[in-house]
Amino acid sequence: MTTEIHSLESYKEEYRKSVTDPEAFWKKEAETFTWFKPFETVCDWNFDEPNIKWFGGGKTNITYNCLDRHIETRGDQTAILWEPNNPDDEVKKYTYKELLDEVCKASNMLKSLGIQKGDRVVFYMPMVPELAIGVLACARIGAVHSVVFAGFSAQALADRVDDAQAKMIICSDYNNRGKKSIPVKQVVDEAMDIGCNSVDTVIVHKNTGFEINWSDDTDQSWHENMAKQSSVCEAEPMDSEDLLFILYTSGSTGKPKGVVHTCGGYMVYTCYSFKNVFQYKKGDIYWCTADIGWITGHSYIVYGPLLAGATTIMFEGVPTFPDAGRFWDICQKHKVTQFYTAPTAIRALMAKGDEWPAKYDLSSIKVLGSVGEPINEEAWHWYDKHIGKGNAPIVDTWWQTETGGIMITPLPGITDTKPTYASYPMPGIQAILVDKDGYELTENNVEGLLCIKYPWPSMIRTTYGDHARCKQVYFSTFKGMYFTGDGARRDENGRIRVIGRVDDVINVSGHRMGTAEVENAINEHPNVVESAVVGYPHDIKGQGIYAYVITQDKTTNDDFRREILAVVTKEIGPIAKPDKIQFVSDLPKTRSGKIMRRILRKIASKDTGNLGDISTLLNPDAVQDVIDNALV
Ligand code: WT7
């Protein structure tokens, strides 16, 4: 039996055990899975290199543990329940048995098209069941999946495919989103034109049947190939530390980096955290509204729930189609018991009015989850009152692409909840606050930088193809610790509140973006000399994107703004479009020529009361000019 925490005492006891003897704690947890060959060591680690190995010597396959293992006990239970974009279309349900059959067929399809263990396969697909099936098929044969969110541009897709040196792309024809059908295959075609030289096959899942271009050299039909396959495919024995997937995420500098997760540790941690954070019970219907293009979808739509034998909902559509009651309609229709979403969605639906949730019976909901960014007090109370009706504890879960699973969170009905506090670390997670010199702040009622001082099974192993970058970004700021990039405070009772990033990463509607990445995109416009991008508080998105732009020929009209938005859309995708563009003649800089973002952030946030000492700047006059023309 896996560690199951059901009382405050057991939380405290498990936490204590996990710190005094981490290896015994994780060994017990890992032994609840099926291993083809037992592991010999629990954890070998060194944060300097970094070199992190969990469950060394063990062989397993995560899909065996997600699927085969459950066939005897719950083969006829729904594994994936798919809710289509259009509520009048048919819901699809896959039992564990059916899902295993489909995954085996897809595995055989990948093999028949030349995919071998270790090859990288990129997914660029909407939220259709075939995405989950394809991802699991990769894991079953040992291919490394890399899912690219289908809102990214052709350029962004090509960058990721090239970095991963993927052999194959799997996509759909179109993406059904609300009233729109968005071309997907067309974006892949464009990406293939500008890069993707490593790709020899594109599998196309016909989702809508609308017209697409077809290239006989590379394109293969999902349906035609699947129809030929047997539904038997043994799961490939994988070393614990073999790659499971790469997921690209933004950092404070340069291009997005490929966060690498491996088979054994990720399996153990996502299952353990899923069971405990959501207190999943047999018969429950769990729904996470994320997209599988992000880590939340990987860990808490696909792997965690399936490992735990849960019924997991996959939703194709958007929260406001056909109207702002859609989420609540789905909760009522499927009697959802655990509902997990992002603060930005809560705020957007809150703005539509209390009458929307009031129309639906939400009494099945036992646990509410929040993830992706700090949840503000107002949204927290609205969620509690109008969705949970005061009866469903809110788990404000803090974690990151790099952590693989939920790290700091209340446990529903077990630990208390406090608005805006992610609260307590999970047993096994040694989260600490340090000051700017890296000294641990051991007392309560302090603010500091959030670090983790001991490894956990689902932590990042490397950044794909660039281990030095992994070391530099996460393990060099403070010696012997993983640095999260977040600032946090701890209250008088030891609860942690994550305040936000302390680096040049912004969080827009729960989407993580590097300011440098957006600047680089803006700078692609030939009429842009220089730009600086910062985040500012935004009512719905959490943070909005504010761009300061110096232009070549002093053009400052809205047409030019639109051109800049178009460049950003082309380079990254619509999610990176600045909300505000201010044309400036100069950007405040230090004597060494570094842009003073601290000042620009304050101006964008309407916080110009105390800009600090600006007299040492290279060009102090620039500050007043920026303030005078600020779009706030
Ligand atoms: C960053 C990680 C984890 C899945 C989705 C985002 C912020 C995430 C919370 C929370 C405050 C949060 C942090 C973190 N963040 N959850 N509950 N409270 N901040 O994953 O894209 O890797 O972003 O999101 O700043 O570092 P991600």
Image (tube, rainbow, N blue to C red):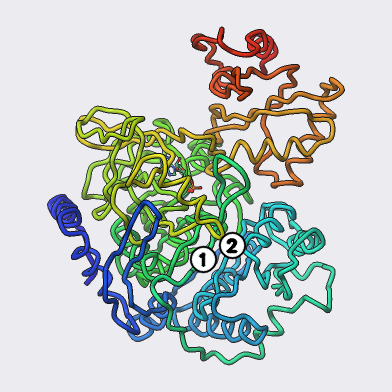
Mark 1 and mark 2 lie on one chain; the one further toward the N terminus is 2
Q: Which quadrant would the C terminus be assigned to in this image?
A: top right
Q: For this rendering, which residue is in front, 148 or 263?
A: 263
> Which of the two marks, 1 or 2, is nearer to us in this view?
1
Residue linked to disc 1: 245
Q: Label 1, label 2: how many angstroms apart (C-alpha)?
A: 9 Å
Q: In the image, what residue type sits under mark 2?
A: Val
| Residue 260 left/right relative to 559 | left
Residue 147, numbered circle: 2
Residue 406 at x, y = what percent? 37, 53
Task: Identify the element where label 1 is drawn.
Answer: strand
Q: Which quadrant would the N terminus be assigned to in this image?
A: bottom left
Task: Identify the element where label 2 is drawn.
Answer: strand
Q: For this rendering, which residue is in front, 278 or 425?
A: 425
Residue 436 at x, y = what percent? 36, 30
Q: Are marks 1 and 2 in contact (CB under 8 Å)?
A: yes
Q: For this rendering, which residue is in front, 55 or 109?
A: 55
Residue 467 at x, y = what percent? 50, 56
Above or below, comparing residue 497 to residue 71 in the picture = above
Give neighbour class at mark 2: few <14, some 14-19, many 20+ (Cα, 10 Å): many
| Residue 545 left/right relative to 456 | right
Residue 420 at x, y = what percent? 36, 35
Q: For this rendering, which residue is in front, 346 or 364?
A: 346
Looking at the rendering, which quadrant does residue 418 occupy? top left
Total marks placed: 2
Residue 566, numbered circle: none
Q: In the image, what residue type sits under mark 1?
A: Phe
